[in-house]
Amino acid sequence: MPKIRLATVWLAGCSGCHMSFLDLDEFLFDLAEKVDVVFSPVASDLKTYPEGVDVALVEGAVANEENLELARIVRERTSTVISFGDCAISANVPGLRNLLASPEDVLRRSYLELADDTARLPHSPGVVPELLERVLPLHAVIPVDVYLPGCPPPADRIREAIAPLLAGQRPAMEGADMLRFG
């Protein structure tokens, strides 16, 4: 059986889901025998999302134009997209930004009102991605195949979701242990 082409993606989030992924400990050795990690902020240094990805774990909400573009590329090039963690599923903590009226209000509060000596707005096209009007969960911008909740999802839950995919099966996301948020 050919190896599964696995990607992990980090959008607007804290990296806690990736840290929990690394907590898979010995399962990472089993995983390494069955997958090729083709894109990941913690396991590769590729900057371009490749074609023909079998499974992608996508952490974080969609908060800016860069996140939106990457989410669309991931969907276009991936067979199974997993919404990885509470931020990807509900926008969670990054979505608190939605309580402010607009991206301009967020930038003004962050870079002017709370700044010390060098208050100025970050406007560097191509360097600082433009904020979207609202922070969105992943499924609001692309179709998602599997939801893996948790903040972060515990390593056991990640293993239970990934193991069936390695055998060509869809994971059974049932019961409190697999569906609990927070």
Image: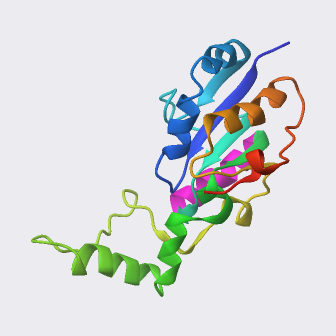
- Residue depicted at x 68% and y 52%: 149
Relative vertical location of residue 125 with respect to residue 133 in this rendering, above or below: above
- Residue most toward the front? 176
Instruction: Answer whether residue 51 is visible to the viewer in this image.
Output: yes
Which part of the image, by quadrant, shows the C terminus? bottom right
Residue 168 in which image quadrant? top right
| Residue 142 on image: x %, y % | 74, 58
Residue 48 in the image: state x and y as whole percent.
56, 37
Residue 72 horizontal side relative to residue 144, left or right: left
> Does residue 94 appear left or right of residue 116 in this picture?
right
Which residue of the protein is positioned furthest toward the left in this rendering? 117
Q: Residue at x 66, y 20 (%)?
A: 36
Q: Residue at x 68, y 14 (%)?
A: 30
Place residue 60 in its image quadrant. Answer: bottom right
Image coordinates for residue 53, horizontal then vertical, percent: 73, 33
* Residue closer to the observer: 116 or 148: 148
Task: Give left or right: position of 16 versus 178.
Answer: left
Q: Quadrant of residue 119?
A: bottom left
Closest to the observer, 148 or 57: 148
List the single residue furthest toward the bottom: 101
Label count reads: 0
Picture layout, residue 141 above or below residue 170: below
Q: Residue at x 47, y 29 (%)?
A: 45
Q: Is residue 159 left or right of residue 130?
A: right
Residue range corresponding to the magenta coloring:
65-77
Residue 76 in the image: state x and y as whole percent.
75, 47
